[in-house]
Image (spheres, rainbow, N blue to C red):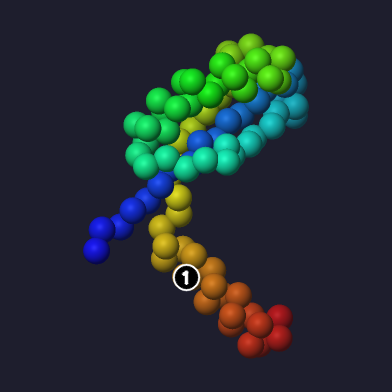
Amino acid sequence: MELFVPFMLFVLKIVDEQPVHVVLERQAILFESEEECFAAADAMLDRIAHEAHMERDDLRHWCLPMPDPSEFEQLIERRDTAKREGK
């Protein structure tokens, strides 16, 4: 069985020169590969900058893989253990 790991696109909006005024958003779309994610980001960043009344240089982006399924399994195990122990 092939393990399929989609990529997520995150965009960081730098609102002004103050480092406390930043917004990190995950775009609500998954991509089949890192290459596809970066290609889509090129097209999306112009639109995002325009809608936010920002310059494209004020945006940073990353394409990151979804966490490994084992991380989800570990989370569920920890949650179930905590429930059983009354935590």
The answer to whether residue 15 is seen in the rendering is yes
Image spot of residue 40 (x, y percent): 45, 27
What is the three-letter code of the residue carrying label 1?
Glu
> Helix or strand or loop: what does disc 1 sit on?
helix
- The N terminus sits in image quarter: bottom left
Q: Is residue 40 above or below residue 79?
A: above
Residue for point 54% across, 73% down: 76
In the current view of this chain or complex, which residue is farthest to the left? 1
* Viewer-nearest residue: 69 or 4: 4
Q: Which residue is mark 1?
A: 73
- The C terminus sits in image quarter: bottom right
Answer with left or right where residue 60 lies relative to residue 37: right
Image spot of residue 35 (x, y percent): 34, 31
Answer with left or right where residue 43 lies relative to residue 23: left
* Viewer-nearest residue: 85 or 25: 25
Residue for point 64% across, 11% down: 55
The answer to whether residue 58 is seen in the rendering is no
Answer with left or right where residue 48 lies relative to residue 39: right
Answer with left or right where residue 68 lies relative to residue 58: left
Residue for point 64% across, 80% down: 82
* Viewer-nearest residue: 43 or 82: 43
Q: Splitting the image into 4 quarters, where does residue 64 fall?
A: top left
Please tell me how crowded label 1 is: few (under 14), some (14-19), or many (20+) other residues with Cα within 10 Å: few
In this rendering, the count of numbered labels is: 1
Q: Is residue 70 above or below residue 63?
A: below
Image spot of residue 22 (x, y percent): 70, 28
Image spot of residue 72 (x, y percent): 49, 65
Residue for point 42% across, 28% down: 38
Q: Splitting the image into 4 quarters, where does residue 80 fall?
A: bottom right
